[in-house]
Image (cartoon, rainbow, N blue to C red):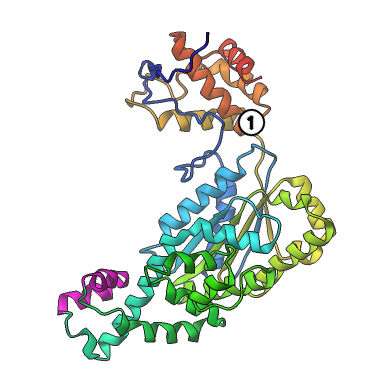
Amino acid sequence: MGALTFTRTQKNYGRFYLRSNPFPHAGIPEENPGFCADREKELASISETILTSLDGHSVHLALLGGYGNGKTHTLKYVKSEINRQLNGGASPKALASFVMTPGLSFVDLYRNFMQDLGLDFFLDRVWEFLGIIAVEEIESRKKAFHNLNREMRQKIRDNPKIVREYVDEGTVLLSSLTKAYREKLLSIVKSVDVANAFLQLLAEETSLLAWKWISGEQTMHEQRKEIGVVSAINTDDKALSVFLDIRSILRELGYSALCLLIDEFENIETLFAQQKQRFLNSIRHLIDLNPTGLCLIISCTPEVWKTIVREYHAFSERIFKEVLLKPLNEATLRNLIAEYVQRHRTVQNDDIGQLHPFSDDSIRPLLEFSQGNMRRALSICNISIDIATEANSEKITGDSLKIALERLS
């Protein structure tokens, strides 16, 4: 009789001078990749596109490559680096959002964009906004802020969102800020619904409901009434309108560029012709209504992109650049393996070798087995490491890779 057990078998990766298996099991990229091996030219082109958007223009790019050639990894790396380098102390600031799939309509795209940024991000921005208003009120010598000493006031000037701490402890009354906050929002956004929803983010009892509406989830009439909004975000036009208002709020907070990284754009091929046309038109309108500070990077398979370029000129002519991610070759595969392995080394010793435990003669068969596909190559490397560990092998050779390939089949 079989039995289900959860006894973990310890693998001795230390014998290869490794902390753990360096390679992802399914070749799926991490949420925040720390590197992007052998993509110098491609990353340089992407960087130039983003910097141009920071300089006050809107430039867009198509990232092309076959399945498993690293498009998702590249986009996630770009997001991580933008938000690490340009979202915070840098000036001007940029913000990146990774959209895992465009969905079936612009409403879906908007919803995926908002969910990627998340409630916590927007709560921080709301309190940052309030802190900026508090600074203005302090400068006007309003009585409501007499409880703040000089040090507290300086802290708000240096880090506006810290005003939340003073509200929570009762040093500053939230009611002293909400009127000015709403007036400021209404001077920035076009929709009263958006202003009311962002106001309701501040109240604990309505915060989640307000976020549900702002992020594009379905809401009932009674729920919308509770937070003072009239219409749901359930059409492409409404989603586009709210997106533009949120873009205006972010710009007010110093985000000069918004980078929207859209993965798996080839999925639009599953749409009916009219759906696809409507969707692409919505994105085209988004581009046209943001002549400055917007950067779209769309990942797509070359075959589908050729169809879009051929059949939807009004959309494709707005994507000024194309970057092609080519399959791995022997040199780039060698560098990819070395990068993964070196990041998991327990010791740094030149005698170990950059590729160890992979032998030099394992690279060519690995390239042949994977056919240059990065995802498949990483999966084979993952299994090869485990097989070599279990077998107490000294190195991973071409024969080891054949066994790994049989397990993958």
Give the percent coordinates (x, y) of residue 247: 53, 72
Give the SS element for disc 1: loop
Is residue 166 part of the magenta span, yes or no? yes
Quarter where residue 59 is shown: bottom right
Image height check: is 11 above or below 54? above
Write the residue at 69% across / 65% down: 283
Is residue 167 part of the magenta span, yes or no? yes
* Dominant SS in magenta: helix
Left or right: 115 in relation to 266: left
Residue 227 versus residue 315: which sits nearer the camera?
A: 227
Image height check: is 366 above or below 122? above
Write the residue at 35% across / 77% down: 130
Q: Is residue 56 visible?
A: no
* Residue farthest along the front direction in this orientation: 222
Give the percent coordinates (x, y) of residue 207: 42, 67
Write the residue at 58% across / 68% down: 220
Part of the protein shown in magenta: 149-169
Left or right: 51 in relation to 263: left
Image height check: is 267 above or below 287? above
Q: In the image, what residue type sits under mark 1?
A: Asn
Q: Which residue is mark 1?
A: 329
Give the percent coordinates (x, y) of residue 395: 47, 13
Give the percent coordinates (x, y) of residue 367: 63, 24
